[in-house]
Image (cartoon, grey):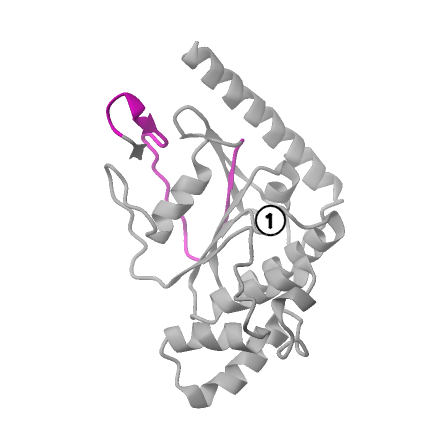
Amino acid sequence: MVFGRGSRRVRALDDVSLDVADGEFVCLLGRSGCGKSTLLALTAGLDQPTAGTIDCGGRRIGVMFQDSGLFPWLTVRGNLELALRLSAVPRKQWRDRVADLLSMVNLPDAGDRRPHELSGGMRQRVALARTLAQDTEVLLMDEPFAALDAITRDAMHDEIERIAHERSLTVMFVTHNVREAARLGDRVIVMQPGPGRIGAEVRIDLARPRRMDDPDIAIRARHLHDLLDLQSAGATRTAA
């Protein structure tokens, strides 16, 4: 993926090849500027690659960002109903579908509240419900919990792990947090910057559910951190 022209050309991604299995939870891990969000945007169809192809096999894709992006003038129910309307869900099904979605994200009584009345974690739960309202099969998440406090973030990790399992979701999750990657991923793709490439792939063979304070998570997080340092050092030497 190349942005700009002439002397302003920036090669954001180069020679990236990645297969993701149905039902797999893949974390894209890397420092700022390594192209992980660009790769996610290309997968979502928000941009087109300069060269190469992306094939999602016709699966329904949903995207969740760091900001919840909820419409402040709508209630929680209104935000979810808008997603259902855009997905051509018959109006007579909206009430039950909204109730199911709010129950799924543990906010059964929040339907009449507006976004400013919710905590950051609650807004992200609603954003997740809105994304899944479209019968999403592939969930793309761009650092959705980065702005949350540690306790809320841990709770959201539990939620997304549970929901991904219950709905057999395929998830691509962008993060720069090594513990988060080790906590959530079946596989972690370590991105190398300048331009963005896949530097390493690490499979996290740990039973679920997982806890952030598990010693095995800490061990794998340390390994991922070491890999990040190696990739960054390699990129610096190449640039020099």
At which x and y percent is residue 74? Answer: 54, 73
Q: Which residue lies under the disc numbered 1?
A: 184
Q: Residue at x 39, y 81 (%)?
A: 89
Q: Nearer the viewer, residue 171 or 77?
A: 77
Query: Among all residues in the image, which is located at the extreme front?
Result: 73
At which x and y percent is residue 2? Answer: 30, 32
Q: Residue at x 38, y 73 (%)?
A: 86
Where 195 sits versus 21, above or below? above
Q: Nearer the viewer, residue 147 or 93?
A: 147
Where 160 sits versus 40, above or below? below
Can residue 200 be seen in this snapshot?
no
Q: Nearer the viewer, residue 98 or 114?
A: 114
Within the magenta stretch, is there residue 78?
no
Q: Tell whether 81 sits left or right of 204.
A: left
Q: Tell whether 35 sits left or right of 1.
A: right
Q: Amino acid at mark 1?
A: Leu
Highlighted range, magenta: 5-31
Can residue 112 be seen in this snapshot?
yes
Disc 1, SS: helix
Q: Looking at the rendering, which quadrant does residue 17 occupy? A: top left
Question: For the residue carrying disc 1, how many other residues have a C-alpha within 10 Å: few (<14), some (14-19), or many (20+)?
Answer: many
At which x and y percent is residue 91? Answer: 42, 87
